Image (cartoon, rainbow, N blue to C red):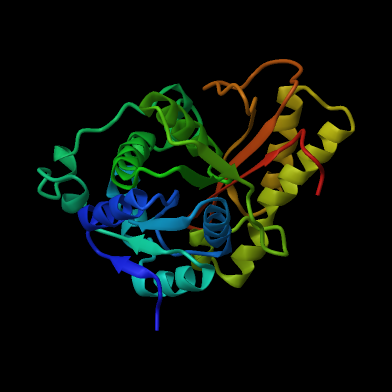
Amino acid sequence: MLVIERIDHPVLAAQWCDKRRARGARIGFVPTMGALHDGHLALVRRAREENDVAVVSIFVNPLQFNDPRDYELYPRDFGADAVLLDVTGAAMAFTGTLAQFFPGSGGDLANVPLRDPGAAAEGLEGERRPGHFAGVATIVARLFELVKPARAYFGEKDFQQTRVVLELARALGGPPIEVCPTLREPSGLAMSSRNARLSPQQRVDALALSRALYAAQSAWQKGERDADALCALLARVAGASPLRIEYAEVRDPERWTAARPRGALQRAQGLLAAYCGDVRLIDTLRLDGAPR
């Protein structure tokens, strides 16, 4: 029997959070789109450890999909996700519909006013997925309004998204954002809900992403600092595979820019996006961090 509370309307979830806060509870919040894996559960465990209760939202947000087919294929199983969250120690999980999250919209995307996602949305994912980060900023702002968390937890794998969320939280006056390290499978493949759509051979092919990132990190450790050289290495290693590379880039992780920084870097975050068959994957790694 599940201990976790499952709520299927965001307003009821907000009322649950209000009652817990009134009793003095600090809420750690993990927004997700479901199809949970160990990477999500690590966020939940940290939220539970650092707060009085952990709350998780599960909502496949249509506002952030620029590819309707990707939205349709995104896995959904609230019941299975709730079982995982129960074992992990989350106190409550909630979901809802677009109409419930945005009253007055009638469930029509065109009736939802979108937030400006800020400068961190420029370039890379923002360029290739028009409107994606506006959809992210819009739903995250709404989720923060409902849950009013003491802290919110996001995974580093969606690195540019974490920059957008950090800007959003600053604009809203909170909550504090905790960016947690990417979890990887033993093979090195970054955990992702989309991995479930990969065939066994595609899972092998997809390792080119982490292989390229670790090669660039190794080059950094050996003294390489030139942005163009690091990008060329990322592209060469990742491109020596069946993957269709969308971008292989570096950015200063503490100062986001739409364009690639030039010359010698003091800090570097490697970022890759590629198609493995019809599945789009992203991966990232702090190049100037500790090697694997």
**Does 262 appear above or below 191?**
above
Q: Is residue 209 left or right of residue 60?
A: right
Q: Is residue 141 left or right of residue 283?
A: left
**Does 72 appear above or below 3?**
above
Residue 259: x and y in percent read 56, 21
- Residue at 64% across, 55% down: 183
Q: Quadrant of residue 270?
A: top right
Q: Nearer the viewer, residue 187 or 31?
A: 31
- Image quarter of the N terminus: bottom left
Residue 149: x and y in percent read 40, 44
Residue 271: x and y in percent read 62, 38
In this view, the residue farthest toward the bottom is 1
Q: Nearer the viewer, residue 61 or 57?
A: 57
Q: Is residue 61 visible?
A: no
Q: Is residue 13 left or right of residue 32?
A: left
**Does 3 appear above or below 249?**
below
Residue 245: x and y in percent read 58, 43
- Residue at 40% across, 38% down: 129
